[in-house]
Image (cartoon, grey):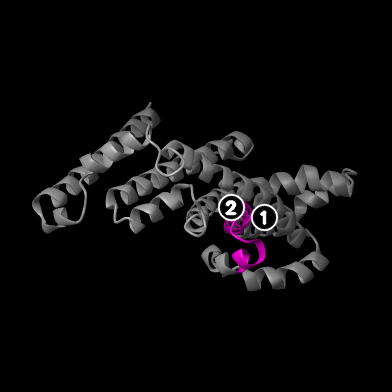
Amino acid sequence: MSKKKGDREAVMYAILAIASFFVFWWFITTFTAAKQTTPGPIEVIQLLIKSLFEPIGNYTIFGHLMVSLRRVAVGFSVATILGIIFGIAMGTSDWARAIIKPIFELLRPIPPIAWIPIVILFFGIGELPKYVITGIGAFTNVTLNAYTAAENVDPELIGAAKMLGTDEKGIFFRVILPSCTPQIFAGMQVALSTSWMAVLAAEMVGAQEGCGWLILRGNDTLNIALVMVGMIVVGVVGFLLATIMRMAERRFCLWNRMGD
């Protein structure tokens, strides 16, 4: 009962915080000098509703959102698969760690945005470079978490499995992989957010659609209301993606929470 009460209070506080933000926004764009350059919440919300039905460029705002989500889905999925493979390989194999880790540690600090000129140079300005940049945003976090998780698997669990006659394949799928799963999901949560930010940057270069292009279009035409519409959509969708990933973690890692 107390947990339900706590959840209700959390929702109420969240609603109050959002309402307070909009009231503050309305106040500064009504009673201060900011009203000369900054649109108020009513104007932005009106444009948001209008953009649901009238296209901006080639698509309505829903179409732009679907384009961005498709790019994130492709880049994130490929990066996640590769990140898990490389991360677990480094965590379980000395030769893989010796070969892969130096290169990974060299490239890891480079942010996805810094790769944009190189990716465009190699792949042009079509869809592929957007997938690549989005994947780069996810790859580092997934790989690092998979590597750390695999490296820290309890050796007593592996030893017990060997004593019971489990072969190497069984040890991997029944001990190592389940032990790594919670931390891999933690890395995927961060990776998904990073991919979402990376695709917005990629869409500001050589794109004609997507949420990033919307913001750039608003900036180029001095339409600050459109910039804010794009920012609101980006924020809401980013929040929803993080929520979905947390729900997936609870679903697939339920056994890891049994003792909580």
Q: Is residue 208 left or right of residue 108?
A: left
Residue 96 image offset from top left, x and y in percent:
80, 65
Going 32% across and 39% down the picture, which residue do you hit? 48
Q: Secondary structure at mark 2?
A: helix
Q: Which quadrant holds residue 170?
A: top right
For the image, the number of numbered tags is: 2
Q: Amino acid at mark 2?
A: Gly
Q: Which residues are magenta?
A: 118-137
Residue 163 image offset from top left, x and y in percent:
87, 47
| As drawn, 100 above or below 154 | below
Going 55% across and 63% down the picture, which residue do you hit? 112
Q: Is residue 190 left or right of residue 175?
A: left
Q: Secondary structure at mark 1?
A: helix
> Alpha carbon of mark 2 to alpha carbon of mark 1: how far?
8 Å
Please say if the residues under marks 2 and 1 sit with CB atoms less than 8 Å apart. yes
Q: Is residue 229 left or right of residue 20?
A: right
Sequence-wise first label, 2 or 1: 1
Q: Is 127 part of what is drawn in magenta? A: yes
- Disc 1 target residue: 146
Q: Is 130 part of what is drawn in magenta? A: yes
Residue 100 image offset from top left, x and y in percent:
75, 67
Give the camera-side residue of 216 and 106.
216
Q: Is residue 153 visible?
A: no
Q: Looking at the figure, which quarter contains the N terminus?
A: top left
- Badge number at residue 187: 2
Q: Amino acid at mark 1?
A: Ala
How packed mark 1 is, by other alpha carbons closer than 10 Å (few <14, some 14-19, many 20 or more), is many
| As drawn, 38 above or below 115 | above
Give the camera-side residue of 190 and 54.
54
